[in-house]
């Protein structure tokens, strides 16, 4: 009849009677099944999510928890608390990894070039990471070590870094 797949799909959807009793019953039953599924399996989803950080799969863990719909305030709150905890674990892990890379760059090249490379990693570390005190210590160490001719450039980069942190705090 000259219709393509998209037209056929649109016509099929348009022909659905949304006031049909059987359709309403089907949708209500599906909703009950979904709610029942999450009531039965929510603890397992949370347990699975907490298992993933042990192997540094934070994004997988967070995706499990974010898939739980807000159908029960208590279950949803448990998932939200787990999301916050796992997200902080992710921030801490990523921060440690990035700090290690920054220290390695600085150890290999304790000059302006090494400082620039180290700052590249430092900029990616969240101020909420547990290692942030070590980050500020590394910045101080680099600042003190930079030769006089390179110090002005380094101070400007550190100032830009602090400005970025302030902008992120404001947004």
Image (tube, grey):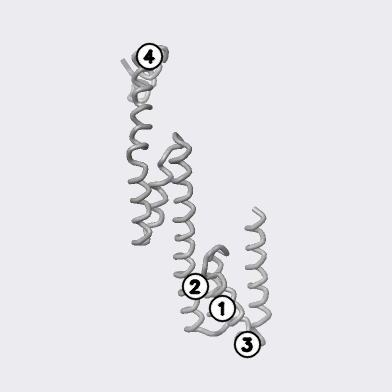
Question: Could you tell me how many numbered marks the image carries?
Answer: 4
Q: Mark 2 touching mark 4, by CB under 8 A?
A: no
Residue at far front of view: 74
Task: Tell me if mark 3 has few (under 14), some (14-19) or many (20+) residues whose alpha carbon lies within 10 angstroms of its own.
Answer: some
Residue 116: which quarter of the image? Answer: bottom right
State the residue at coordinates (46%, 79%).
Answer: 104
Q: Mark 3 touching mark 4, by CB under 8 A?
A: no
Q: Earlier in the sequence, mark 2 or mark 1?
A: 2
Q: Which residue is mark 4?
A: 15
Q: Mark 2 touching mark 1, by CB under 8 A?
A: yes
Task: Tell me if mark 2 has few (under 14), some (14-19) or many (20+) residues whose alpha carbon lies within 10 angstroms of its own.
Answer: many
- Residue 160 position, x and y percent, is 65, 68
Q: Which residue is mark 1?
A: 138
The answer for how far apart the CA atoms under marks 2 and 3 are is 22 Å
The answer for how far apart the CA atoms under marks 3 and 4 are is 76 Å
Q: Earlier in the sequence, mark 2 or mark 4?
A: 4
Q: Earlier in the sequence, mark 2 or mark 3?
A: 2
The answer for how far apart the CA atoms under marks 3 and 1 are is 16 Å
Q: Which mark is residue 147?
A: 3
């Amino acid at each position: 009849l000259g219709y393509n797949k998209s037209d056929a799909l649109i016509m099929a959807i348009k022909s659905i009677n949304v006031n049909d009793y059987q359709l309403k019953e089907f949708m209500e039953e599906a909703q009950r099944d979904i709610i029942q599924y999450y009531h039965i399996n929510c603890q397992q989803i949370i347990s699975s999510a907490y298992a993933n950080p042990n192997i540094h799969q934070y994004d997988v863990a967070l995706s499990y928890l974010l898939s739980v719909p807000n159908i029960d305030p208590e279950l949803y709150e448990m998932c939200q608390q787990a999301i916050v905890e796992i997200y902080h674990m992710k921030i801490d892990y990523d921060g440690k990894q990035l700090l290690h890379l920054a220290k390695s760059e600085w150890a290999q090249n304790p000059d302006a070039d090494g400082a620039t490379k180290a700052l590249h990693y430092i900029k990616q570390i969240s101020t909420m990471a547990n290692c942030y005190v070590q980050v500020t210590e590394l910045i101080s160490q680099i600042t003190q070590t930079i030769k006089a001719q390179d110090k002005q450039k380094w101070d400007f980069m550190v100032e830009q870094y602090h400005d970025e942190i302030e902008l992120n705090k404001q947004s």
